[in-house]
Image (cartoon, coloured by chain):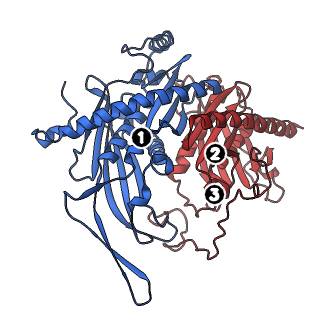
Amino acid sequence: MSTNVMDRRRINGPPRTVEPLYTTEASTDPFADGRKDSRALDQVRPIYMKTGPLGAQTADLLPSTATTASGSAFYEQGNIRISCAVYGPRQGRKSNARMGSFDCDFRYAPFSCSWKKRSHIKGADEKEISLMLEHAIAPAIRLDAYPKACIDAFVTVIESDGKAATIAAAVNCISAALADAGIELYDSVAACSMGLWGSQWVADCAQAEEDATTCSMLIAYMPSADEVTYILQHGKTLPEQTDQAVQTCTNLCTRVYAVICRGLQLSLE
Amino acid sequence: MASLVLSPAEQDFITRGVEQGFRADGRSGLDRREVTLRTNMISQANGSARCRIGHLGVGTDVLVGIKAEVNTWAPGEPEDKGTIVCNVECSPSAAQEFEGRGAEELNVELTQLLDRMLNGPQSGLELEKLCIIPKQAYWVLHVDALVLDVKGSIVDTLVWAARAALLSTKLPRVVVESITDEDGNLQSEFDVVDDAEDQVAVEGAENLPLTVTFNQIGKRYVIDASEQEEAVTQARLTVAVSPQLEICAVQKGGLLRGFPPSLLTEILQTARRIARDEFVKFKKLYEAAGSAQTTDEPNTGSTFLGAF
């Protein structure tokens, strides 16, 4: 994928490299004898969250100098690790806009994904996920309180484990960062993903589990407003299955929301 | 999705009209505009279709062309399947803001949406039949869509055109010869038959889904929004339904608000009901488009979608 495009800004490795092929294929059913990390089918992975200057969040990392962000958050959900910085409200591009604009920039770090080394150049899927995150979060922001301004969120996925789950985690991370930045919100947005395995919905699938599912569903929800701000489903389902998934997923989102709120409270102490 | 600047009075007029059950062109909330469909007008492509949704010959216009290529298998790719590669481009002739890189975001969004619908078991296509020799060669179908005009409801028009194009696609027949060599390995070679009469269709294309896009305006929702209605839309939901009335994809768009979960469920029910009628309409139009080529009309006339 990255072999055709010359990236002139960076020092490139050899022009043609391939991923190694592993001789022992451990392709066992990830759901045989319950889930690998012994979670229930409707249980989300444990969440760790920290807001504030990026250097102070993880003791192992060196303190960073990027303290100019209005708000930032570091979010972990199982093996998913995401960092988000929010800049704004700052001067927008259109000087006559009655409402502020919210822009999101999502990118995977090149080493973050299990499926392939990613190019430094943004792929189409990263661009689409940026749009998805904008659609999911913008309804929650009081954009009419920030005319002529723009709010930018920059999300970097440090480690990814399950495509839909990573996007859900990104939504949660941005919610936390926006609250940390003091942006006026109607409500925090909490997101959760599910996968359909056979005829059962499994919450928060890791990559191996997601590869075994036939359908994936991602829902971003505002519990206080009772509004689903984003839904993305792909894969065949019967309508009853979709309805059931919407119900279950919104309940899980409410639980994730409680965790995010608690995390924000702790960060104030 | 292309933005139209409306005055607050116009916005209010449309919103209140929809809430009372009136739309500017007299349709009901669940009516689609007129659909015109033509197929197989691009002689160089393996399949093509052009779909226009709108009144009086003006509407959202999408042209889809399908080219099939044979690709050599590389380690890491699926061993016994072909693939579909989608690309959607909005032509600057559709709107001034699409000039240069203006349409980039919209192109990415539409490409990914089409890619999600066509690649994967939910498309209903039998990708295994597109494999020529396992671990050696397979068909790649390049689905290229060109959006020629935008008058609201791009996604539905795009999916109608893509479905018609895939249904009309004819692949050359491939003859595979296998011999077992001295080491006992099976060596296979294939030949593409160069006969215009001897072609096969893409298996499973009848199972492709159609989409219905619901736009929430005020307290009610409408389908097949016109440009003006899209400018007033607060949130939209695209639902893809298969001919067997299963839900294949759901995607929400719109930056201003979300949907209450109860409304989501209602919309999914309505989508299935509307899709049932849409498939009947599609079949009728597709068959009419097919029979239009057998008349004595000159070929150049078939690219244009009918005079008014």
Say which quarter of the image contains residue B38: top left
Check disc 1 and give the amino acid type: Ala
Q: What amino acid does circle 3 point to?
A: Ala
Q: Position of residue B29 (x, y in %)?
A: 45, 18
Q: In the image shown, does A86 or B95 lie closer to the viewer?
A: B95
At x 82%, y 50%, the residue is A56
Picture residue at 82% right of the left edge, 60% below the top: A60
Q: Which chain is red?
A: A
Q: Is residue B166 above or below residue B93?
A: below
Which image quadrant: the C terminus of chain B? top left
Element marked by disc 2: loop
Does residue B91 show up?
A: no
Residue highlighted by disc 2: A199
In the structure shown, which secondary structural element does the residue marked by tag 1 occupy? loop
State the CA–CA distance, disc 1 to disc 3: 26 Å
Direction right: furthest residue: A269
Q: Quadrant of residue B97?
A: top left
**Label 3's element?**
loop
Chain identifier of the blue chain: B
Residue that appears at 38% across and 16% down? B27
Could you say where residue A147 lies in the image, as x and y percent from the top left? 60, 25
Q: Which residue is mark 1?
A: B103
Identify residue for label 3.
A109
Q: Chain of mark 3?
A: A
Which mark identifies residue A74? none
Q: Residue B207 at x, y = what percent?
A: 42, 44
